[in-house]
Image: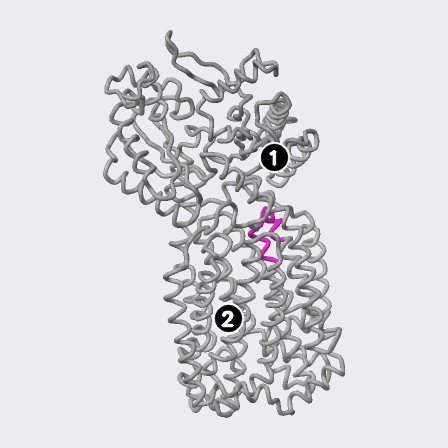
Amino acid sequence: MSNHHQDKASFLERLIFNNRPAVILICLLVSIFLFYQASQIRPSTSFEKMIPLSHPFIQNMMEHRNDLANLGNTVRISVEAKDGDIFTKEYMETLRQINDEAFYIPGVDRSGLKSLWTPSVRWTEVTEEGFAGGEVIPQTYDGSAESMEELRSNVLKSGQVGRLVANNFKSSIVDVPLLESYPDPNDQGKLIKLDYQQFSHQLEEKIREKYQAQNPNVQIHIIGFAKKVGDLIDGLVMVVGFFAIALLITFVLLYWFSWCIRSTVGVLVTTLVAVGWQLGLMNLVGFGLDPYSMLVPFLIFAIGISHGVQKINGIALQSSGADNPLMAARRTFRQLFLPGMIAILADAVGFITLLIIDIGVIHELAIGASIGVAVIVFTNLILLPVAISYLGISKKAIERSKKDEVAEKPMWRLLSNVAHPNVAPFMVVLALVGGVSSFFYQKAYLQVGDLDQGAPELRPDSRYNQDNDFIIKNYSTSSDVLVVMVKTAPEGCSAFKTLSAMDELMWKMENTKGVQSAVSMVTVSRQMIKGMNEGNLKWETLSRNQDVLNNSIARADGLYNADCSVAPVLVFLEDHKAETLKRAVSSVQEFAKVNNQEDLDFRLAAGNAGIEAATNEVIASSELTILVLVYIWVAVMCMITFRSVPATICIVLPLILTSILGNALMAFLGIGMKVATLPVIALGVGIGVDYGIYIYSRLESFLRAGLPLQEAYYQTLKSTGKAVLFTGLCLAIGVATWIFSAIKFQADMGLMLTFMFVVNMFGALLLLPALARFLIKPEKLVGKTGGSLLSH
């Protein structure tokens, strides 16, 4: 390199390119270490990582978790008799074996396991001599016809029809509560964290496959958080296949773009190195892969390809006027390192803003993505130019670049018209109309939370959702339970004042749309008082006599805690759709506002519906904050870089428009704003800013050279615009493969990312120059060198 060019080189450039062998050796050693770490990363998630631990609902649940029996993380196994009903010797024997098999699966809270075969499931009746009762399956059970008749009678008297036993008597449930951590059988002082994937596999192998094969008349249905997460983790295997497809597509398109196999391989290898480093660092900080953080390697790959394409495009352009590959690589590094660094910083802080959502899986996603974009600085901004300085660009690619530089490009000439005084106003008005109409549409129709029954993360025809449909149709109590915790002084939960208030709450909830039924110790108390008065329906009410009330709740096991200071009200919902949860929570809050007293407190919420409601509230309160913070940071970075308010507006406005259009698309497609989809909107902004920064930095350099705006934009399109267009389409095609995923939320994310990549690209190509026509004054930039960090 000539002395002239050496003089212009920064310290960082000299440090890197004067020590190229050391740079490659260091990257090689780091790669060996981090790729080994990446090979150790495992699928990992937990119940607590999926919930907002600082939300008041969750804090109340965690405070009283030992007072609430089986209201947290549970799995329900429904054993169906295909022919006949459950009252056969063969069916009951299979149910007993399934009960025992589930009892011994590691991670099961054995004290809380419930089925017809557990002693805790009892029947009660009123006779002439008083109350009689016992276990539903008596000690004398032998499978005979007489035993079956006795069992049928006991089931009818147990109150479990619609709960543990189906309404049509063709199936029954084994209710399996889980422990988040459990003692190691080989070392009782050590706790093992529940492995959801392994637990799900054990349910399939030890329960479903084994007993359906053993008894062809039995069909087994399994639902619950652990089973759903296990199925999602199994779906990660498919994601690896999609990654391979995206890699192949990117390779073909990169070669078509560059006409150089060396630079194509260089970009792909350095980007894969970035993904490997990111996974290795995630393992080092103790993170695993959960269904939501699987998005991160794709994002890092996408961002890496985006910056890599800019680098090889720049090197190809510089190679025509450089003496050797080293000079071309150094000139490209000098020209693109700073805009690339600014774009990556904008990406990183965009990801970090996700930390304000107090949900563990989103924290890990945010940290993992931030680590990944930091890694890209070393792999795609430093290692790639160094590697290309050795490999060089093929003569074919250089010749093509030379021709492109001087040739007239009709497509780019046509596209540059968006900066024409007559076309620019039309583009701005079109964007304004689209943005305003989309804003009001998404305000009216976009909902926070799930919009479908079952597990919306999975396809409607998935095994899990089919099992869930079966249980909804055959049982009176759904799997969606909202638990209200009634807090009193010790021994206060049986007081008439408490029970009367609980009774009123149950009545209010049962008359709320979307609620199936409500159950509490009041339910048992009223039944027992009726029973103590010869079953007379007139007595099915609460007594004001405290001794009568105390006797009436004696059999309400699990519906109050040891010192009678906490009593749950179980509200069974038809589904966990966003509006159902909002309506139910609102009803409870209205009731609590009127009835809460110093010694009587109605607290929300436990149960899976309570957790969903808390999560929805966190998402709703965080969505706007996240986007505002992302835009503020992007604007700050643009201001620092270009030192121009108009330039900042030109880059940020297309990103805001894309976010609004993205929310409108979600509303139109019936996709709710939830844990799986919220990060996509925020992360899409981070990737989109790359396009704007690269385009504006080149546009500004041509304006400083004295070109009029439309001609300057034409030259920008010939140099950088081609890379932006290619990158947007390449990444969109790559993530579009997700749309075919068996996991619905990944399909939704693939659709949304495809949309964000394409619209951000067109926003930068079409709206940015149109805004520049109104906001940028080219005459003020001519000959000016000090106004921007990117000036040289």
Q: Is residue 469 above or below residue 737?
A: above
- Name the spot of residue 180 as percent of width and height, x first: 54, 35
Quarter of the rendering containing residue 694 = bottom right
628, 591: nearer the viewer: 591
Magenta stretch containing residue 287, yes or no? yes
Mark nearest the camera among 2 and 1 is: 1
Residue placed under numbered mark 2 in the picture: 689
Task: Say few, some or many: other residues with alpha carbon within 10 Å of mark 2 (under 14 / 14 to 19 / 20 or more).
Answer: many
Magenta stretch, residue numbers? 281-297
In the shown orientation, is residue 750 left or right of residue 71?
Answer: right
Tell me how the rendering is colored. one colour
Q: Is residue 574 above or below residue 141?
A: below
Q: Residue at x 46, y 75 (%)?
A: 651
Type of residue at label 1? Ile
Quarter of the rendering containing residue 103 = top right
Residue placed under numbered mark 1 in the picture: 220
385, 8: nearer the viewer: 385
Q: Is residue 426 above or below residue 730?
A: below
Which residue is at the far top? 129
* Element class at badge 2: helix
